[in-house]
Image (tube, rainbow, N blue to C red):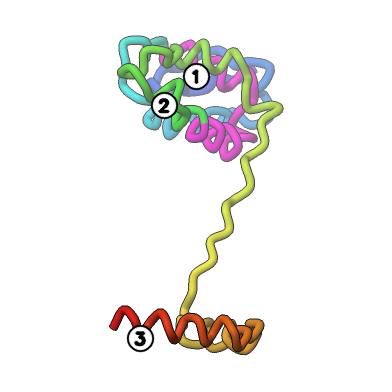
Amino acid sequence: MFAIQDLFGEIGKPMAAVRDDPENAADGFAEWWAYWPAHDRKAEKRRCLDLWIKQGLARHKTHVMAYTEFSLDTKMYKDDDRAYLPAPLVWLRKEGWIDWRAPPKKQIHIQTNTVQVTEHHKKAATPMPPELRAKLASMRRKIG
């Protein structure tokens, strides 16, 4: 058996989940904890770390962090001064990231050259019927 030094600088007993790689078992936890918003319920850092290690979240830190960002950006957790924001320990126990898939990224179409686009559409457009063209011309003469 060996001992590991946790984020608090204390030596503790190893857990079964970290026997293979104790140095990296808490990888990502410090960033996750720092990202969690300051709130009345933000407490029990040691128990959160223990759960992080026990669940082996260091291997999935990118996915867990993405889910955390997604969750904290929802209306439920943002409104009413974050009244519905759970304690980090409760949030970790729920394991919501397991079945979560990141939403697809929105594709944004940016027009780089409006003149080219306009000319392209003019070429592709159906020509205006002559009777409609004449009617518009007479209306313009009456106005102007």
What amino acid type should be assigned to the residue bearing mark 2?
Answer: Trp
Of badges 1 and 3, nearer the viewer stands: 3
Q: Residue 141 got which mark?
A: 3
Which of 77/30 is in front? Answer: 77
Q: Do the residues labelled 2 and 1 touch (CB within 8 Å)?
A: yes
Which of 116/92 is in front? Answer: 116
What amino acid type should be assigned to the residue bearing mark 1?
Answer: Leu
Count of marks placed on residues: 3
Q: Which residue is tagged 2?
A: 33
Q: Gap in Å between the C-alphas at discs 2 and 1? A: 9 Å
What type of secondary structure mainly makes up the magenta span?
A: helix
Q: Seen in the image, is 99 located left or right of residue 117?
A: right
Residue bounds of the magenta highlight: 45-70
**Quarter the N terminus occupies:** top right
Of badges 2 and 1, nearer the viewer stands: 2
In the image, residue 81 sits, relative to residue 70, either above or below, namely above
What amino acid type should be assigned to the residue bearing mark 3?
Answer: Arg
> Mark 2 falls on what kind of element?
helix
Q: Which residue is tagged 1?
A: 49
Q: Gap in Å between the C-alphas at discs 1 and 3? A: 79 Å
